[in-house]
Amino acid sequence: MLPEIAAHYDAKVTFVNDEARQLRFHFMWHPQKGIEKVVSDLNQFERLNITLNDNQITVK
């Protein structure tokens, strides 16, 4: 899901480890929201830690 979201905002996504890449969750994405709000919403999930720096999304 995150690569598709990143592509919509012309951003890149990096996964720090394979565990982060394998996480599965249910998220209702609204493309009209800004990327900062989407990252903030995703960080509400207990097992996700996502940062955004200059159109680079990093998942830890």
Image (cartoon, helix red, strand yellow):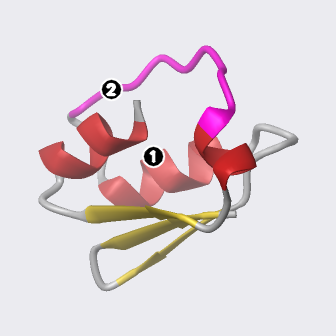
From the image, which quarter does the C terminus lie in?
Answer: bottom right
Number of marks drawn:
2
Instruction: Give me the disc on residue 38.
Output: 1
| Residue 6 in picture, x, y percent from top left | 27, 51
Kindly identify the residue that appears in the image at 64 percent across and 34 percent down.
22
Task: Estimate the x, y position of residue 19 in percent, counting from the top left.
Answer: 74, 46
Residue 28 included in the magenta stretch of the image: yes
Q: Residues within 10 Å of mark 1 (few under 14, many from 20)?
A: some
Direction from residue 2 to residue 7 in the image, left or right? left
The magenta segment: 22-31
Q: Quadrant of residue 15?
A: bottom right
Image coords of residue 45 (percent x, y)? 77, 37
Q: Residue furthest bottom?
A: 54
Q: Considering the numbered disc 2 on the image, is that residue within a helix, a strand or a loop? A: loop
In the image: residue 12, left or right of residue 16: left
Q: Which residue is mark 2?
A: 30
Residue at screen point 61% across, 14% down: 26
Q: In the picture provided, is 42 more to the left or to the right than 5?
A: right
Counting residues from the start of the chain, the first of labels 2 and 1 encountered is 2
Closer to us: 56 or 34 = 56
State whether residue 40 appears in this view: yes
Q: CB of mark 2 within 8 Å of CB of mark 1?
A: yes
Q: Secondary structure at mark 1?
A: helix
